[in-house]
Amino acid sequence: MNTTSSVVTKVYDNKTTASNYVAHQVAEKIKENNTAGKPTILGLATGSSPIEMYKELIRLHKEEGLSFKNVMTFNLDEYMPMDHSSEKSYHYFMDVNLFNHIDINKDNVHVPAGNLTEEEVGAYCADYEAKIEKAGGLDIQILGIGRTGHVGFNEPGSPEDSITRMVTLNKVTIADAAPDFDGADNVPKKAITMGVSTIMKAKKVYLMAWGEKKAEIVKESLNNAITDQVPATYLQKHSNVEYVLDKGAAGE
Ligand code: GLP
């Protein structure tokens, strides 16, 4: 794929081989840090894109002894309002798709709270940022991409210097989430998300996208001039980012 940015793009025949590649990159970083006696700080994503990658990490734990005892995680986002025990929550998603199946200490797991009052949000978000910094920053950030070009829930209009905060979801994002909530009316209208600058500070970023329906936004995010209207274009400025795509998502 020709790009005008320095972003590395890797294209795989299918999402399974692509997901396994990312899982093995994550595993190598964890093993390297485990050997050095250092923790590994992971920024994690929800949505359909990372599910197979998480499956492979679970397999590596169960069959090959990969240990998450020294891993600390920070998830990108959560709907708001959202009860953490709800099957629609990203808390539930992460437990079911990863955390319940590995040896991570749940005290080291952080998913933004979706049950805060609006008065509590400011202090909570500042604390989320502080916790990431205190941990030493994100070694790896995993991303999907929304059809609006959002990363996390940084919708069009998100400033480059944005940090963890409460946001209002875009109509396209609400429409895309509607099937999970039995209709657009039931989709929460707000979310808590890590900011663009939170993501940009990660030492390494992997953005995963599968299928033809992502091809157009993948192309725009790689080739358009950097614009807050397609927040993923900010990644063109990151010095260590890989787009990991299947053939469908790379089609444009
Ligand atoms: C949601 C999440 C994003 C995710 C996007 C794409 O909006 N907040 O973090 O990247 O959806 O989802 P999917 O991977 O299902 O295409």
Image: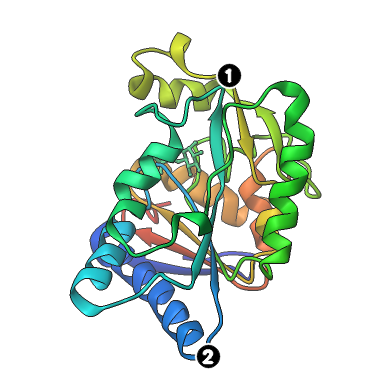
Residue sitting nearer the eye, 147 or 247: 147
Residue projecting furthest to the bottom:
36
Q: Is 19 located above or below residue 75 in the figure?
A: below
Q: Is 70 located above or below residue 80 in the figure?
A: below
Residue projecting furthest to the top:
185
Residue projecting furthest to the right:
161
x and y, in percent, of residue 140 in the image? 55, 67
Q: Mark 1 points at which residue?
A: 189
Q: Mark 2 points at which residue?
A: 36
Q: Is residue 35 left or right of residue 128?
A: left
x and y, in percent, of residue 22 in the image? 38, 68
Type of residue at label 1?
Lys
Which residue is drawn at the image coordinates 67% and 35% (left, top)?
Answer: 156
Which residue is drawn at the image coordinates 47% and 50% (left, top)?
Answer: 45
Which numbered disc, 2 or 1, marks the residue that appears first in the sequence? 2
Residue sitting nearer the eye, 190 or 132: 132
Q: Is 145 located above or below residue 74 in the figure?
A: above
Q: Is residue 98 left or right of residue 195?
A: left
Crowd class of label 2 (few under 14; some 14 to 19; many from 20; radius 10 Å): few
Type of residue at label 2?
Ala
The residues bearing labels 2 and 1 have C-alpha atoms spaced at a distance of 43 Å
